[in-house]
Amino acid sequence: MEAHSLPNPSSFHVLTFLFTILLFISHHTQPVSATTSTTTATTSTTTNQAYANFIRTACNTTTYPSVCFKTFSRYAAVVQINPWKLSNTALNITLKAAKSTSKLVSKLAQQNGYTPTDAAVMKDCIDNIGSSIDELKQSIQAMTTVDSSSDKLFQMDSIKTWMSAAITDQTTCTDGFYGGEVSPSVKNRISNSILKFTRLTSISLSLINNLTY
C-alpha cells in the first residue's frame, strides 16, 4: 500500500492564519465604506439645505418672494451663500427672460390685421424692451467691475438707476396696450411675458439694494 503524505504542520498554520486575516479585513472594510458614504450624503444634504435656506431668506426681502425662490433655488449650488453671486445670477436670468419677451413681441408684431395705431404700439413696445435689455447688460457689466472700481458707491448707484429705468421701460410697453384694439389673446400673451420679465427685474433690484459694499 502506498503511504499518503501528511501536510506540513507549519504550512497548515500559516494558511490558517492568512485565511483568518482575510476574513477580518473583509468583515471590517464593508461597514466602514458604507458609513463613510452615509456621512458624505448627510453632509451634502445639509449643505444643500443651507444654500436653499440662504436663498429663501434673501428672497423674503424682495418684492415677489415666492417667484424669487422658485426661480433661483435651482441655482443653489452656484449661489451657495454668496449674495453677490445671487444678484449676478438674478441679473443674467432676467436678461434671458427679457430677450425671450423681445422675440415673442417681435414675432407677434409681424402678424397681419393690426390697425396703424396698434402696429405703432407694438413697435414702441419692442423698442422699450430693447432699452431694458441694454440697461440690464450695462448692469451686468458694471457688477463685474465693482470690486476694481475706485468709487463703488457711484458704480452701484448707476446699476440701480439702470435697473429702475428697465422697469419703467417695461411698464411703458404694457401701458401702450390699454385703450387699443390689439386682440385680447395677443395682449395677454405679451402682458404675461412682460409681467414675468418685470417681476424678475424688480427682484434683481431688491437683491442688489440689499448688497453691502
Image: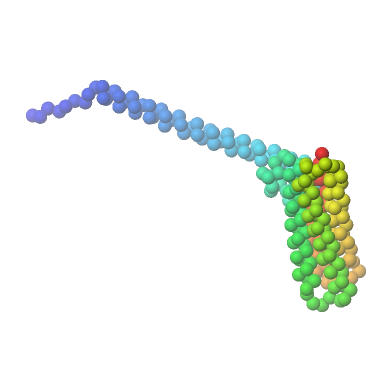
Most foreground residue, 191 or 150: 150
Q: Splitting the image into 4 quarters, where does residue 113 fall? A: bottom right
Look at the image and tell me in which quarter the C terminus lies: top right
Most foreground residue, 19 or 124: 124
Most foreground residue, 132 or 39: 132
Q: Position of residue 109 (x, y in %)?
A: 80, 71
Q: Residue at x 51, y 35 (%)?
A: 34
Q: In this rendering, is residue 152 above or below 133?
A: above
Farthest-out residue, left: 1
Look at the image and tell me in which quarter the N terminus lies: top left
Q: Position of residue 159 (x, y in %)?
A: 83, 49
Asked which colour scheme the image uses, the reply is rainbow
Q: Position of residue 30 (x, y in %)?
A: 46, 33
Q: Position of residue 155 (x, y in %)?
A: 84, 46
Q: Is residue 128 left or right of residue 34?
A: right
Q: Residue at x 27, y 25 (%)?
A: 12
